[in-house]
Amino acid sequence: MKKILLVLLTMVLTYNVQARTFEQIKSSGILIIGVPADYAPLAYHNKQGKLVGFDIDMAKNLAKSLNLVPVFFITSWPTLAKDLADDRYDIAMGGVTYTKARAEQFLLTDQIIPNGKIALASCQSAPKLIDLAHIDQPDIKVVVNPGGTNESFVNTHIVHAQIIRVKNNIDNIQALRDKTADMMITDLIEGYHYQYSEPGTLCLATKTPFAGTKSYKAYMVKLQNSELLNAINHWLAKSTINPIAKKWGVHTQIE
């Protein structure tokens, strides 16, 4: 059985085929989930190198409800949309923010977690970075990675501060630890996670989402896969998110 699944997965990931229909997904026995895997606590590699997080548990729960085996495909924020469009996987998870642009290209599920953009900083820098006016100063170093809504926010709102561009979100966090950057724009979800997991090192400089940034996390499938979307939304309505959210310290409401 494992060999059959491996062969099928290899074919799906190697060739640019049409999006698998819901019936084809069910017949295959596997659900392929794309995750950038750099967004704690939603989907990331722990110190042992294991892929873990809120959305990883949610994906496993979803697959189980559909009698499928979950298979994870590691994508990136710059290639997230292209990989889904190229049928590298069936569903994108792991920190996808609902945006109008994404909604024009893909189908997005009902709300998973409410969210908003905040400033996460080294605890040394946090007290002076209380709002955008204090952040956007020539002596402040803002670190950002490409391809996501955080970069869009930085490109739009940061004019005077120094922008340090790194490869991925993991490098953002490390820059704050190393104090080679003062702060980063990120989601409230991620900010809470790092403040509580690395007390004294990483701190929320702002706790209320910046004006106009309130959003929510969703899961994303191709436009042709409305049947899959309906199945996911049906599962969401019936599933209990709170125990998984509590396990990973995810807030289901904005304070």
Image (cartoon, rainbow, N blue to C red):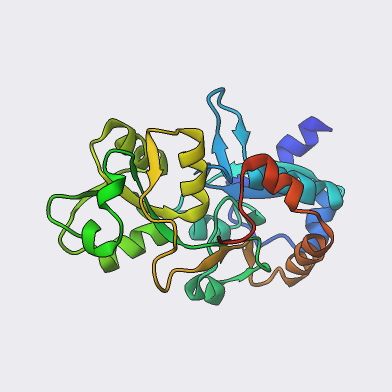
Q: Residue at x 69, y 40 (%)?
A: 247
How many marks overall? 0
> Quadrant of residue 244 in the image?
top right
Q: Residue at x 74, y 51 (%)?
A: 242
- Residue 136 lies, in percent from the top left, at 21, 60
Left or right of 46? Residue 213 is left
User: Which of 32 and 197 lies nearest the eye of the viewer?
Assistant: 197
User: Which of 149 and 222 lies nearest the eye of the viewer?
Assistant: 149
Q: Residue at x 68, y 48 (%)?
A: 245
User: Which of 238 and 77 lies nearest the eye of the viewer?
Assistant: 238
Q: Is residue 58 visible?
A: yes
Q: Is residue 148 visible?
A: no
Left or right of 109? Residue 191 is left
Quarter of the image with the C terminus in it: bottom right
Left or right of 84? Residue 212 is left
Quarter of the image with the N terminus in it: top right
- Residue 32 lies, in percent from the top left, at 68, 48
